[in-house]
Image (cartoon, coloured by chain):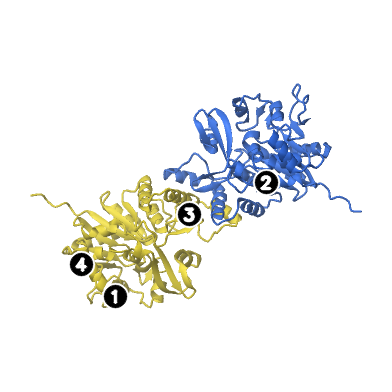
Chain colours: A yellow, B blue
Amino acid sequence: MSTPAPRSRVLALSGGVGGAKLALGLARVLERDALDVVVNTGDDFRHLGLAISPDVDTLLYTLAGLADPVRGWGRCDETWHFMAALERLGGDTWFALGDADLALHVERSRRLAAGETPSAVTADFARRLGIDARIAPMSDDPVRTRVRSDDGWLDFQDYFVRRQCAPVLRELAYEGAGQARASSLLLDPAHDTALRAVVLCPSNPWLSIDPMLALPGVRAALAACPAPVVAVSPLVAGRAVKGPTAKLMRELGLAVDHASIARHYAGLVDALVVDAHEPGLDAGPGPRIVVAPTLMESLADRERLARTVLEAADRLPRKPHRSPAAGAAREARA
Amino acid sequence: MSTPAPRSRVLALSGGVGGAKLALGLARVLERDALDVVVNTGDDFRHLGLAISPDVDTLLYTLAGLADPVRGWGRCDETWHFMAALERLGGDTWFALGDADLALHVERSRRLAAGETPSAVTADFARRLGIDARIAPMSDDPVRTRVRSDDGWLDFQDYFVRRQCAPVLRELAYEGAGQARASSLLLDPAHDTALRAVVLCPSNPWLSIDPMLALPGVRAALAACPAPVVAVSPLVAGRAVKGPTAKLMRELGLAVDHASIARHYAGLVDALVVDAHEPGLDAGPGPRIVVAPTLMESLADRERLARTVLEAADRLPRKPHRSPAAGAAREARA
């Protein structure tokens, strides 16, 4: 009689900075090669003719130990001679590109133009940067998050970087998501009985996680997957650690609390890790609530939260395997 | 009775480093706005997806006071973080691109992709870099210098940079030159009675000047132009100051001396400035020989050679105006 293979693999869904911190924690506490990270590409855009994929880059730099620890984006020990020269030539300078960071964008653009897929380029970059985890863009097809504001529809980076999230957000759209083919890493969990957990990193649910959930079949695959799905709330002490999450929630008419996050992920996640209890949070039929420190300042914080998430997953009952078709049917009725 | 306008404008034809030195000298001794420089683009190529125009860039950097005085190419005070990061990502590193230099290539590529012409982009860059002289690529159409060697036909930068001019050169071709439209600055001299001189800078005649002469109408325009045409030999003390000129001349079966340069430019230039006399150099029907120091080490050297060239031009008799059609007819018979 053969023993079942240990359920060792973990799939993490991540946006940029906050998600990457937990992904790094997971990479450090898991065995080598046990972590797959699927990354939002709704923020991708063309700038100066270059293919820029901000969240993928943040994951690469973070897991390679190259991320700037203070700025929260880009590389550590970065220099800015390109930007200074570009400004003198009258080029667009609202999106900062460091000298070393540029290599990623130039080389990615070259390889995409030569016919490689974003997945292949990302996997090769990860290998060359010495990253053991598998990092994959959520899709090789273009998906573009757009923001309807009081100024009309805006491209994401226009809203996020150029306008510093100042416009009041009314609606979000993930253009192209309906026609895009999701990474197989997002669809495989439906059948993967060896998967230990699916982790929704503490990224902005609307800007970073929802673009992945909007890809055909992904909600169904996660709903059908036998492994527990654990999310970490991006709110700490009632606020977003970084970025526009709290402002966005208010503008969408939501209370800035874990209950809003729990409702957003209802039916999808089995447990939600939050930094502090809220009255009535675990009263309803929503996810199981796990209270634990979620602020990740040090590397030890990242590892501790990773262990918390894995332990929460391991304590949850395995779910019966359901076909993703049934999941899709539920999704269609929803 | 009106006095004729002073003949103040000078047109210089230039390749990269050596030519740019004299162009700088001319820019400094001439009145503001009196210098037009037309630059070889046969060395242009696409690298890493970027439109790179090495000779135009050298002219821009040199006339803006940004050129590296030691390397002979690129910018002074350059840094190389992009190249180091590119190497780590497995990118092509045989062509060095400095961090600040990259801005020129990225912004040019972006503007060309947006539909601007190389001439318009170059003129705008020159203006933004504070350059008074007009700098124009020899054509807005692609011309690509190629080298037939014992290894077969090679792209120019492959021969020049990647292989360091090591292959034995057998033949040169200027692909696209026959169909390219020359810059109007190269054709206007035929009619321009106010032009003081046309200067062929001490660039490599075969690699830097001939691509311009291969453009339709350019030889005829220079032959017809009333202004004197003065060339400066790129040889100093019987050798090339920099680059593969001497090796190339030997491989083409030519003696490495001013007489070979004089024969190459016969029928086109009225005077040739050389650093030292050679026996019999001015015996034939070739250009008038002017002996003067041509090594340009200091800024004063550049200015002195510029004055030498202008004085040589001013001493030559104005030529009768001939229609470029007659010139073209002569060219066709040659």
Q: Are marks 3 and 1 in contact (CB under 8 Å)?
A: no
Graded by Cα atoms within 10 Å as few (under 14), some (14 to 19) or many (20 or more), the crowding at tag 1 reads few
Of circles 1 and 2, which is in front?
2
Q: Residue at x 34, y 48 (%)?
A: A131
Chain letter of the residue carrying label 1: A
Looking at the picture, which amino acid does disc 3 mark?
Leu
Which residue is more in the foreground, B24 or B247? B247
Q: Is residue A199 left or right of residue B257?
A: left
Residue beneath label 1, please?
A: A278
Q: Using the numbered discs, state the Cα–Cα distance from disc 3 to disc 4 in whole angstroms.
A: 41 Å
Graded by Cα atoms within 10 Å as few (under 14), some (14 to 19) or many (20 or more), the crowding at tag 3 reads many
Task: Check disc 3 and report its element: helix, strand or loop.
Answer: strand
Q: Using the numbered discs, state the Cα–Cα distance from disc 4 to disc 1 in whole angstroms.
A: 34 Å
Residue beneath label 4, please?
A: A326
Q: Are marks 1 and 2 in contact (CB under 8 Å)?
A: no
Residue B76 in view of the camera = no
Looking at the picture, which amino acid does disc 1 mark?
Glu
Q: Are marks 4 and 2 in contact (CB under 8 Å)?
A: no
Of circles 3 and 2, which is in front?
3
Which residue is more in the foreground, B4 or B133? B4
Disc assigned to residue A50: 3
Q: Position of residue B302 (x, y in %)?
A: 72, 39
Q: Earlier in the sequence, mark 4 or mark 1?
A: 1
Disc assigned to residue B63: 2
> Do the residues indicated by labels 3 and 1 lie within the same chain of the protein?
yes
